[in-house]
Image (tube, rainbow, N blue to C red):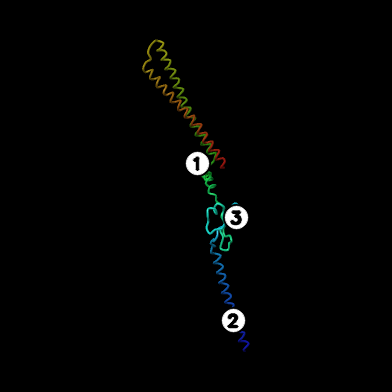
Amino acid sequence: MQSQFKQKLAFIAQKKMTRKFIFLFLMIFQSTAICAQTPLKPTWYRYYDTKGVANISTNVTPNHIRHGYEALDQNMQVIQRNRAYNSEADVKKAPLRAAQAQQKTADLKLKKAYTNSQVAIKKRNDALMYIKKQLAFQQDQLKQLQNDRIYFKRQQMEHLRKGENTPTALKNNLDYNQKNIEEKKKNINSLQTNYRNTQAEYDNIIARLKTLE
């Protein structure tokens, strides 16, 4: 009977020990989980200079940033690495990045406006054809004005041959004709320049679109 009582006491004691062990295990597990979730805070910051000498401080200095640095915990274990940053080199690259961004924006506009090089080729041909028609019309008018001037000049020479003064109406016709001829020549030169510029502009657009395809 006494032996059974001792066995019962031993069972109860063992059960209590098991509960304590489980409780202790759960506490340790919970503590470990909390530590794992909590990010480590840097205590030291270390960088190596050009001679390979380690420099440690409690805060980040311009030298840290320039050389690149490591964030260390209180046990001097690396918890984060940061690449070197050269502000002077970054400033020098700024115009290049700006040009690249500008080119990207221009490329997006080209794609939106023309979709592809074949569409741009068609638009170029249509634009050049329209200018050609205008140019042909202006050249026909110039030719007519030049023929009119020959006629007016013949009339003037006839009056001079007879020893007569050139009539006022004929003088006005000659003056008006000359102004029109000069104006037509300007228009033709302008259209020819426009033709060349339009062709060059579209050629650049088409070439760029082909590189993007």
User: Which is more foreground, mark 1 or mark 3?
Assistant: 3
Q: Tag 2 or tag 1, which sits nearer the N-term? A: 2
> What distance separates the C-alpha of mark 1 from that of mark 2?
86 Å
Secondary structure at badge 1 equals helix
Question: In the rendered image, which quarter is residue 154 located in?
Answer: top left
Disc ID at residue 144: none
**Cα–Cα span, label 1 and label 3:** 57 Å
- Amino acid under disc 3: Val
Q: Kindly check if marks 1 and 2 are in contact, taking CB atoms under 8 A apart as contact.
A: no
Label 2 is placed on what type of residue?
Answer: Ala
Name the residue located 57 percent from the left edge and 74 percent from the top edge. 24
Q: Quarter of the image holding residue 53?
A: bottom right
Query: Which mark, residue 113?
Result: 1
Hey, which residue is sitting farthest top in the picture? 162
Between 154 and 60, the residue placed more toward the observer is: 60
Callout in the foreground (3, 2): 3
Which one is in front in this view, the residue at disc 1 or the one at disc 2? 2
Q: Between disc 1 and disc 3, whose residue precedes?
A: 3
Query: Total label count?
Result: 3
Residue at left 54%, top 58%? 57
Task: Check residue 13 in the rendering and tell me which mark sits there, or answer none.
Answer: 2
Considering only vertical position in the picture, is 48 above or below 10?
above
Say which residue label 3 marks: 53
Q: Is residue 211 left or right of residue 141?
A: right
Q: Secondary structure at mark 2?
A: helix
